[in-house]
Amino acid sequence: MIFDRKNIDNDGLITFYKKLLLPRLVEEKMLILLRQGRISKWFSGIGQEAIAVGSTLAMEANEYILPMHRNLGVFTARNIPVARLMAQWQGKASGFTRGRDRSFHFGTQEYKIIGMISHLGPQLAIADGIALADKLSKKKKATLVFTGEGATSEGDFHEALNIAAVWDLPVIFLVENNGYALSTPVNEQYRCESIIDKAIGYGIEGKRINGNNVLEVYHTVSELAKSIRENPRPVLLECMTFRMRGHEEASGTKYVPQHLLDEWKKKDPIDTFEKYLLDERILRPEWVPYLKNEFTGLIDTEIEKVFSEPNIVPHAQTETDSMYRLYRMPEHVPYEVLSNRRYIDAITDALQQSMQKHSNLIMMGQDIAEYGGVFKITQGFVEEFGKERVRNTPICESGIVGAAVGLALNGYKAVVEMQFADFVSCGFTQIVNNVAKTYYRWGQPIDVVIRMPAGAGTGAGPFHSQTNEAWFTKTPGLKVVYPAFPDDAKGLLMAAIDDPNPVMFFEHKYLYRNISGNVPADDYYVEIGKANIVREGTKASIITYGLGVHWAIEYAEKNPQHSIEILDLRSLQPWDKEAVIKTVKKTSKVLVLHEDTMTSGFGGEIAAYIGEHCFKYLDGPVMRCASLDTAIPMNKALEDQFLAKARLGEMMDKLLKY
């Protein structure tokens, strides 16, 4: 192995050696602890340290690095104390996630490291968002993100590289090619000769290097980072290396031919660099055991210190309170100017005024720029705010949600438009794992709103008509709102954008141009989590939201003799339990109405809560009225039959007879 020191002096080379040695010795200690049963799991990076260490030293201290689960050298090269890392691995309160997540699944703004989640691909698009924030802020910075050769088979890899290429984002996509994704060899992962061949398809630069040569890694990443700071663009960097131990220790290495282990043992990044330093008389032979003993003593002391820390005492309320960042809505300012606005106009107003208020707010979605979106909600926004803030995206929901997460990590707000709520399934992992869980895991709020044009009534069929709020109401960490009126649409959307927590904002497409109402012209906020009585009554209550509110109003107006109270939930996560209890106590008969299918629809949660907490106030069973348990048909007659409205009168008659 040939080492080219270039302009690095002797002290610098010794520093490189120390930075390589520390993570190796930490790992060796972990393997001992694993055999002793003092830790339960370990993902080894032995044999790959040169990539983590060399690339980290090449980046500036204030530039983000997004490593994987065997990149211990990133964390130690950024000088994170071993005790803090050990506390994280052991699930102690002093760890970065306070016992809420494992191994390297954490981030730290202090050290500008954003750790992975178990789903490997989503990491890459987050780097896009971080780099986009730097580019928008005119900061000359690079972002480094790691992945393995196995994860390059995931769709998230394609989406992230494509976005970075289209937007000229300063990202180094570093692939550690160690030959195996757990046990699957590269010849079963892809057919191209090397991973950098994929760069051609994105129109970006690709470079392949020896990942076991710490100086080659350092110089390559240094040069690339320096270049893309001045000329923003993505680069795909393939680092050839080998994993000398199993995917994790329980996996073993029996699937690896012995000749490969023997061959790569000779290329060990620490042994070869140590030999180079000794041969060049930069490192004295007697220094090697001295340094190892010094590090070993430090590691032993730091680790035992953590083992002696008390275990976490669980407290349910603490955990519940940690799902969302505390948020106080702007104080209510009495509004005087009202204008009659359609539901769709109210959403446009909320977006426009929020863009004016928050200079760090970025909007992203398919066709939202010059075209104004498929519903024309953002028409004219490009002229007012420019294409940097109103961004057309490639068709890649997962990648764009990931980019929104990256923007939030790096000081921006983001609004993502799903062209139709149905398409959100393509971004599901990002939403339910990254967006929803990041604040709980390591205290970083994800300031993202995802707009969801949803619902039936237009004969659009199974893939453009779903109202899929129940996919998200059961996911802690997300707020879910679903306004029924123009004023609520504006007030809730402005509140959602102002709120640092992630919000799924459902907009019913049928209501866009079919209802109007008085809406405050100035900035206007409606508190998320508060229901609203839209019609007073005494005989029975209909609890509903979205289009269901208008079905309920139509029924009540046609049947004035029944004195029906209508409670519009407006927010589904959190939802207003006090308002539900109050209306149940008042009327003693309840029907829960929603457009979603009956089975596992959100109405089941409301009904269950009422049955558990309000049973003594009921004069009849809690009824549910929902859509059929089928996909949504296109034909109008079939769609009408599918929708809950078709059974509303029947269910109310049944309820009122008790």
Image (cartoon, helix red, strand yellow):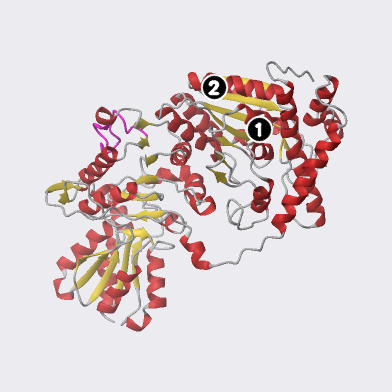
Magenta residue check for 197: no
Q: Residue at x 59, y 25 (%)?
A: 236
Residue 553 at x, y = what percent?
20, 63
Residue 246 at x, y = what percent?
77, 42
Please report the bounds of the magenta region as a residue range. Answer: 366-381
Q: Which mark is residue 149?
A: 1
Q: Residues within 10 Å of mark 2 (few under 14, many from 20)?
A: few
Mark 1 falls on what kind of element? loop
Is residue 561 or residue 58 the one in the foreground?
Answer: 58
Q: Quadrant of residue 239?
A: top right
Residue 372 at x, y = what percent?
28, 33
Look at the image and tell me in which quarter the N terminus lies: top right
Mark 2 falls on what kind of element? helix
Q: Residue at x 48, y 35 (%)?
A: 130
Q: CA distance from mark 1 to mark 2?
A: 17 Å
Is residue 649 or residue 549 the one in the foreground?
Answer: 549
Q: Main secondary structure of the magenta part?
A: loop
Magenta residue check for 377: yes
Q: Which residue is mark 2?
A: 201
Q: How many marks?
A: 2
The answer, for residue 133, to whether it is visible in the render is: yes
Residue 136 at x, y = what percent?
40, 29
- Looking at numbered disc 2 in the image, what kind of residue is underneath it? Gly
Look at the image and tell me in which quarter the C terminus lies: bottom left
Q: Residue at x 68, y 55 (%)?
A: 90
Is residue 142 or residue 380 the one in the foreground?
Answer: 142
Mark 1 and mark 2 lie on one chain; the one further toward the N terminus is 1
